[in-house]
Amino acid sequence: MKKILILFAVAASLVFSDCTKKFDSINTDPTQASAAQFNANLLLPTVETGYTGAIAGYGGAILYQSMWVQIFANPEYPGYYSNGDKYVNGGSYNSYLASPWNNTFSNAGRAYEIINLTKDNPDLSNLSGIALICELLHIELATDVYGDVPFSEALQAKTAGITTPVYDKQQDIYSSMLAKLDSVIPTLDAGKVKPTNDVIYAGDITKWKKFGYSLMLRMAMRLTKADAATAKTYVEKAYAGGTFASNDDNAFIVLDDAHGFSNGNATALGVAEDYTQVRWGKTLIDDLKAANDPRLPVIAEVPLDGKANAANKGLAGISTPAIQEGMPNGYDQNGGATNISNAPGYPGGTGTGNDFNIIGKYSRPTTALYLSRSCPEFILTYAETQLLLAEAAARGWSVGADAATHYKNGLSAALQSYGTFNPVGVISAATADAYAAAPANALDVSSMDASLKQINTQFWITTGTLFNFIEAWNNWRRSGYPVLTPVNYTGNFSNGTIPRRFIYPSSEPSNNGTNYSAAVSNLSGGDQYTSKMYWDK
Amino acid sequence: MKKLSLVFTFLAAMLFASAQDKTITGTVTNSAGKGIEGMNVILKGTRRGTVTRADGSFSIKANTGVLVISGVGYQQQEVSIDGQTSIDVTLKDASKELESVVVTALGITKESRKLGYAVTTVNGDQFNKARETNVALSLEGQVAGLNVHGTAGGPGATARILLRGMPSINSGGSPLFVVNGVPINNDNRGSAGEWGGSDNGDGIQNLNPDDIASMTVLKGQAASALYGARASNGVILITTKTGQKGAPLVQYNGNFVWDKPINLTDFQYVYGQGQNGVKPGTINEAQNTARLSWGAKMDGSQFTQFDGKQYAYSPYKNNLENFYRTAPTVTNTVSVSGGGDNGTYRLSLSNLDNKSIVRNSGLTRRTIDFNMTQKVIDKLSFTINANYLDQSDKNKSFLSDGPGNPNNGFFLASNINEDILKPGYDANGNEIVFSDDNYVTNPWFVVNKWVNNLDRKRLITSISPKYNFTPWLYVMARLGYDRINDRHLGVTPSGTNYEINNLGQSGDINLSTTQLTELNVDGIIGISHKLTSDINLDATLGGNIRKNQDETVGISGGPFVIPNLYTPGNVVNYGRSYGFHKKEVHSGYYSVDLSYKNFLTLNTTGRYDAYSTLYYSSIPTNKRDIFTPSVAAGLVFSQLVHIPSLDFGKLRLSYAQTSGEPGNPYQTATYYSVGSSINGTPTGSYSGTLPNLFLKPFTVTEWEVGTELKFLQGRLGFDIAYYDRKTKNEIMNGSLGWETGYSSYVVANGSVQNKGLEILVTGKPVVTRNFEWNISVNATSVSNKILQTDLNGNTLGLGTYRPLNANIAFVKGLAGPQIMANDYQYDSKGNIVVDASGLPLAAGARTPQGSVLPTFYGGVKNDFTYKDFNLSFLIDYNYGNKILSATKFYAVYRGLDKSTLPGRETGVSVTGVDGTGAPVTTNVSAQAYYQRLAAISKTDVLNGDFIKLRQVTLGYTIPEKAFSKVPVIGSIQLSLVARNLLIIMKKSDNIDPEAEFSAGVNYAGIEGTSLPTTRTFGINANIKFKN
C-alpha cells in the first residue's frame, strides 16, 4: 500500500515536473534545415527553373499566348486550348490564369529570400546579385502579363509583416527595375565566390553580367512607346555595359525529366490529345515558306497519313518544306460553320474511314526536335538581343552597329539556336550566315516602319519557334508586328480582339482586396483581357 | 508462480466450465404484491430472455449469472441466480427510477441526475443490425446536436461528424473518439478534391459494430473539458462489450446485406450526342461529343460512333444500372464471453467481406477484440483491452474530376450505352479514349486496370490497474496505445492514354507506408466520500502525458519499363518522399463534484495543458501552457416543488473553457528543405506557409443551460439544451497572395461562434400487454457565425470543384463555410449585362450564397414491439444548407439537364443590356446560352434540404422454448434490415443532397462525379449457443 502510494507520487511528479524542457527539441522538424544549417545557393536553381515553369507548359503560355499570337492553332472545342485559339474560357481557366502570378511571385520570393539569407555575408555578394537579377526577371514577367502588380511592398510578409502589398503602377515598376539592374550588375565580381548551384551559367559571373545587361536591354525596349527617352537611356547603357556576344551566352536551362524537372512545353505537347491537335499557325508557316527559311524543315513536319499514324509518336512526319501547311486559328471539328474544313485554303484530311484525320495535312512541331521532356528551355537569347538592338539602331540610338548588321547577326544566331534543343535542329553556321547575308533576307531600311516590321516579325518567328511564347506576345503587343487577324468565336472573352493581358487571379479580391480594387480602377476598361497596360500603347 | 496458476485456472475455467442449464421459475410483482405481466426477464450479458405471463410468472433456462428484470413503468432490477431455482422479484415504480448511470469523461460513471450538462447514449443495437461500413454513420439522426454526414466515396468512406455545428475554423470538425477510456486516432487518410483523389477513410470506421456496447456523446465543453485540447470538438465515448459473470456464452452474429445503386438523375433524352443541334457526322465529331448532348432530336437513325461502328441515334437510359452492380457485404462475428468471481472476459473474432458497387473494388476487415477484467489481489484489479484490425481496401474509387474515376460515365451523351466502352482497352492493352478529354479515363479501363489499394493493420491496446485503498479511495493508471500501420499502393496502369510518352511508355506507381502512434499515460486518484449525511464529495485528480508520432516513407516512379509489371523497380524515373511529425502534451487535471441531498450537484473541473507544438524559444514571452476551468450545476427541482404529472425535473447550467493547439507541429520556425537534383545539381526550397513565432494556445468557451423533464411515469420525456460557444485566437492558415512571398500564413486570430438549441422528446404512446410503441424525436437548431478570420478579416478560401468557377470559404460575419459564386452581371438598373455575342456575363466577384452546413436537423425514431417482433425505423431530416453541384454544372454544360430543352431548335432569345447600358435582344444558340449559364456559378448552387427514411429493422426473436429440444442452439434473433431506403423529400435535382466527395469541412457541400447513392438491405442473424 505504501509502496503504491510512493509509486504514484513518483509517477505524478513525472507528469507535473517540467519535462516540457524537451519540448523545443520535440517541436523541431528533424526532416528539414534551420536557416543556420541551410545553404542559400540551393534556392538559386529553384528560382531559375521556376522561370521556365512560369513561361512553359500548361502553367505557362502554351494554352494562351502561343495561340493568341498565332504561333500555334488547335481546333479542339470545347477544350483547354480554346483559351488561346478562340479566346473562349476552357478547361481550368481560373487556375491557368493564376499560374504566371503564382509562379513568378513565389520564385521572386525565393530570390528575395536568398538576398536576405546572404545579407550578412559579403563573400556571397555574387549569389545575392544574381538573385536580385532573377527576382527582377520574374517580376518583369508578372507585370508584363498582368499590368500593375505589387512590387515595392511585395515579398515582405516575413521580413516586414506585409500581407497585403500595394499594387505599383507598371511605369514605376519598370523605372525601379531598371535602376536596380543598373546598380546591381556592376557589383558582380568574377574575383569573388561564385554561386555553386547555378543551372544557367554554372556560376560564370561574366555571363551573368551580360545576362543582366541583356535583360536591361529587353526591359528598356519594352518602353519604346510609353517612354522613349527612358528606353533610349537604358538601351544605350545596356549596350555599353555589354549584352550577349554570341549564342554561347544564351540563357537556357537543360531540364531533367527523370528527377521531376520536366520541360513544360514538351510535357504538354506530349499529351496524346495535344499531340494530335496542336499545329503550327497559318501565319507563321506562310511566312517561313515565303522566305524559304531554312528553319521550316527543322521545326515542322506533316504527320503520316491517317489518324493512327498521326497519334503515334514513334513515327516521324515529313519535313519537306513545300508540303508544310499552317492551321488557321478559330476553327473547330464540330461540323458547323466554323468546322476546320470550311477554313479558306483547307488542304483536306488524310486517311479514310475510321482512320480519317481531318487535320492530317497541317504541320506539327517536329517531334524529334521539341518533345523530349528533358529538352532545354530558352530564357533569353543572343538572337533576341540583336533584334532588339537592330530596332534601337533603326530608331537612331547609339548601339554600336547599324540596324542591318544587328538584324543580320540576330537572324543568323536565331537559325543556329535550334541545335540546343536537339542535334536534329542544327543549322550550320555557314548555312545560317549565308541565309542572313543573302540580299533577299537583308533588313529593309527603306523606312523605319519597314525596318521595325521586318525586325519584329523576325523576333516573333524566333521567340515563337524557340517556344518563348510570352515574349513573342509581349513584343507583338509593343510593336504591333506581325499584323494578325483576330478570330471571333462565339462566346469569346475579348470582344473578338487579341487579348492584351491576363485578368488578375480570381483569388486576389479576397487575398488583397483593397489593393486589387485600386489596381483595377486604374485599368482602362477594368480587369479585362482587352485592357491595355502602361507600355502597351 | 501464483500468477501463473491464476491464469491457468482462468483459462481452464473458460474451457471447461459449461455446466448444464436448469430452469428457473419465479414471479414478478409490484409493490402492492400483484403479479405484473409483460416484464422482460433477461439473463444479463446475453440475449436470452423471456416475458412474464399475465400473473407475473416466468421461467427461464439459466445456470449462473444475473437476471435483469425490467419493463415499462417500473424500475429495473437485477437478481443474482446464485444456485436458486425459484426467484421472486418485487419491482419498484418507475417514478422512483431515477438512478440511471452514464459514462462521462475519463470513463468515470456518474448518476445522470447529477450531471450539469447534456449527454446522450446510443446503444449498440442501433448500429449493429442495420449497418454501415463506417459505424459512425449509424449515429446519423440519432442524437440531438450531432450531425453526421458521409461521402459518396464507397465502402469505408469517411464520416464528417459535427457536434453542435462547425466547432472551429481549423479543427476539421471531428470529435475525439475515446474507446474504453483511451483516445484513438480518427485521422482522415486522404480525401478527394477538385482534381480527383479517393476518400481513404477515417479511423473510427476500423471498429467492428459487433464489439460496441454503446456510444456516449458528450456534447458540450463542460462534459468533455477533462479531455483538454482535443475535446474542443466534443467527445464520443465508445464502450465495448464485456463479459458477464457466468459460464462461457458463445454467440454468432451474421449480417448479410446488399448495396444497390439508386439512379437519381432525371436527364433529358430528347436530343442526342452532338453540338449545335447537329448529330455527329464523323468519328472525330463523335469523339468530341461523347459527353455533349447538344445534337439533333434522336430519331433512331444510324450514325458512326467514336469507335467507328454504327449505332442507332436513340436514347439510352440504363448506364447506371448496368455499370454498377448490386454489392453484397457479409459480416461474421463469433464471440465468447463469461467470467468468474474475480473477473470477466470477452473475445470476439469478426470478418467483414464487402464488395463495392464498383466492380473490382471493395473492402475486407478482420478484427479481434479482447477484453478482460481481473482481480489480482483483494484490492487490485486490472482491465486489459486489445483490439486488432486488419483491413484491406481494394481499388478505392477515385472521385470528383480527375483521371482514374470509374464514375466518369455519368455525363455520357444521352444516346450512348456505356457498354460500348468495354473493356476499356485495345488489343495492346492501351486505353480506348472515348471523349474529347483523355484525362477523363474510360470507366471500363478504370475498373479493369487501375489500382488504388489501401491496407491497414492496427492495434489499440490499453491496460489499467486500479487499486482500491478503501471503498472511497482508489488509484488507477491507464496506459493506452494506438498503433496504425498503413500501406498504400496506387498504380496508373500501363496504357493509360494521357501518360503515353513519345517512346510509347506509360504508367506510374506510388507506394507508401505510414506508421501512426498515439500513446496516452494517465494517473488518477479518485475519492468518493460522504462529508456529512447530506453532502457527498466525488473528486478526481490526474495527470496525462500524450505522445503522437507519424512517419511516412514513400517511393514512386514511372513510366514502366516492362508494361503491366507494377513494382517500384520497374520504372524509368524514381521519386521518394519522407514525412515525420511528433508532438507531446503534458497535462494535469482535477474534477470535484459536490452533491447535496441528491438534488443539487455542483461540478468543477480544471485542466492544465502544456503543448510541445507551441513556444519558440527565441521569444521568451511566448506561452505554451494554459489552465482552463469548467463549472456545472444540476438541480433536480422536482424534489423541491411538486408539479402534477411531473415525475422528474432537472435544471442544468454550465460554463466551460477548453484549450487547443495547432493541428501540426513545426509551425513556429522557418525550415528549409532539399528537393530533387536537376542534372546532378541539388535544389532547395521552403514552405509557402509562413510560420508564426508568436503562437499561444487557443480557447473555446461555452455556456450551456438545459433541462430534463419526465412526465406520466416516464411515458413522456424532454431533454432540452441551449448553448453559446465561442472560440478565440484560433490557430489556422490564413490565405495570402503569392505577391507576399508566401501563399498562406499561420495566424492565431480566428474566432467562431455557435449557438444552438437541442431538443429530445421521448414518448411511449402505447403500452399494452403485447404491444409497445416507443418514439423519440430529436431536433437541433444551430447558428454558426465566423466572428474573425485572419489579421485582415479576409475571406479564407477553402475547397472548390473542378469547374473552378466557385468555391467555399469562411467569410467574416457569416455562417461558415459559405459558397462563393458568381451571380449574373447587372448594370446599375438591375439589367443583365450581355457580351457581344448576346450571352449573359458573370459578375466579376464571387458573392456568398449560403452555408454548406445545415442549420436545422434531427431524426424521428419509432420502435414497435409486438410479442417477439420488433419494428424500428428512423427518419432523419436536414435543412438550411446549400450544395455546390458539379453535377448541375456538367448536366447543363453538357446538355443533359432538362432545363436545357427550351430553344434547342429555335435558339434562345436573350434580353439584356450591353456594356454601355443600351438594351440588347439577341437570339443565341441554345448550346452557347446554356453553357454560359452553367458558368454563372450561382446557378450551380442547390438547396440541400432533405428528409430520408434512414433505417428500418424488423426483428423476430424465436422464443427460447422453440429450442428446448434442439441441441447447441440456445436462441435465435432474426432481423430484416435496411439503410437509406427512401428519400422522402429533397430539393436538389439529379443528385443525392448528401453526395459529397470529401468529408472534410474544407470541402463540405461540394459534389460531383462520385459514386451513386446506394440503398442497403439484408438480414441480420444472431445465434446464442447453449452453455
Image (cartoon, grey):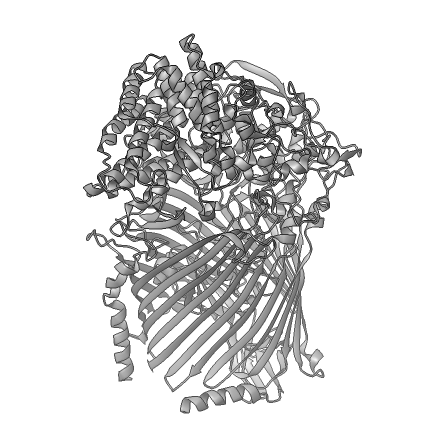
Furthest toward the right, the residue is B301
**The quarter of the displayed image where residue A394 is located:** top left
Residue at 28% x, 19% y: name it: A236
| Residue A275 found in image quarter | top right
Residue A214 in view, yes or no: yes
In the displayed structure image, the side of residue A122 where residue B1021 appears, left or right: right
Give the image location of residue B873, x and y in percent. 62, 58
Q: Nearer the viewer, residue B429 or B607?
A: B429
Residue A217 picture location, percent across and down = 33, 23
**Residue positioned most to the front:** A430
Q: Is residue A79 left or right of residue B190?
A: right
The residue sitting at 56% across, 83% down in the picture is B248
User: In this picture, is B592 found above or below B501?
Assistant: below
Q: List x then y, in percent, for residue B594.
A: 31, 68
Residue B896 can be seen in this image: no
Q: Is residue B13 above or below residue A273?
A: below
Query: Residue B895: where, in percent of width, then height?
Result: 65, 33
**Which sits in the foreground, B14 or B807?**
B807
Q: How many marks?
A: 0
Q: Say which of A491 and B932 sits in front.
A: A491
Q: Residue at x 39, y 39 (%)?
A: A50
Q: Which quadrant of the figure contains the C terminus of chain A?
A: top left
Q: Quadrant of the N terminus of chain A?
A: bottom left
Establish if A155 lies above or below B192: above
Q: Splitting the image into 4 quarters, where does residue B220 fall? A: bottom left
Q: In the displayed orientation, state which residue is furthest to the top.
A: A446
Depth order, front residue of A375/B600: A375
